[in-house]
Image (cartoon, rainbow, N blue to C red):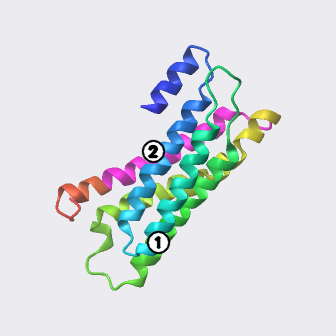
Amino acid sequence: MFNGYANLLNELMFDNLFVYSLNFSWSYFVLSLYFAKLYSSTTLRVIILSIVMIFQIYSLNHVQPATIQATFDSISFGLIGLLITIYGLLYYAKQLGNQPKENILYVPDFWFVNGIFTYYASNFFIFLTFNTLINRHYADISIIWRIHNVVFLVMCIYFFIGFQCRSSQGRFR
């Protein structure tokens, strides 16, 4: 929804960076709730939800209206990308630390976390350096976003596999 609106604004020659900021904030909120649900540790859940609250308050205070020339908040995007990558690593550590009760390849959450981890770990440096690349014209941004889109496709493939596991009661077809 957000990306479609951002594309529309771009086609109409309006600034769309605030929409990407809203998208990223919303995505972080939803993914944090998902990871908090995956962990059995109450302490870890409280830490994740506290970070979410702090980031959401920060985001609300720093959303730039569409009427001014907006900038891309690379630091926040990079930090959130790093946090979500860490959440994925914590999930993997939890899975490796326990005696497996089932084949992890048949667990939908494994595939969902793989997709999320792949996307955020791969795009961490894109998010972190994007504002600098735009402002200093170091690179052709379209090439960078093509890489981003390929990684996004890989994430979607992992999600597809995860949904196949879920629809077959924990067994991949």
Q: Position of residue 157 (x, y in %)?
A: 38, 50
Badge 1 density bin: few <14, some 14–19, many ≥20, Cα 10 Å: some
Is residue 115 placed above or below 39 in the rendered structure?
A: above
The reply to whether dot 1 and dot 2 touch (C-beta < 8 Å) is no
Q: Residue 75's mark?
A: none
Q: Residue at x 62, y 47 (%)?
A: 77
Q: Residue 44's mark?
A: 1
Badge 2 density bin: few <14, some 14–19, many ≥20, Cα 10 Å: some
Q: Residue at x 52, y 24 (%)?
A: 7
Residue placed furthest toward the bottom: 99
Question: Viewer-proximal residue, 123 or 58?
Answer: 58
User: Is residue 122 found left or right of 42 in the rendered image?
Assistant: right
User: Is residue 33 found left or right of 50 in the rendered image?
Assistant: left
Specify whether residue 166 is painted magenta: no
Q: Residue at x 61, y 35 (%)?
A: 63
**Quarter of image, res 64:** top right
Type of the residue with mark 2 = Leu
Q: Earlier in the sequence, mark 1 or mark 2?
A: 1
Type of the residue with mark 1 = Leu
Q: Magenta stretch? A: 138-161
Specify whether residue 140 is painted magenta: yes
Secondary element under disc 1, as helix, strand or loop, is helix
Q: Residue at x 23, y 58 (%)?
A: 166
Is residue 136 placed above or below 37 in the rendered structure?
A: above
Secondary element under disc 2, as helix, strand or loop, is helix
CA distance separating discs 1 and 2: 30 Å
| Residue under numbered circle 2 | 153
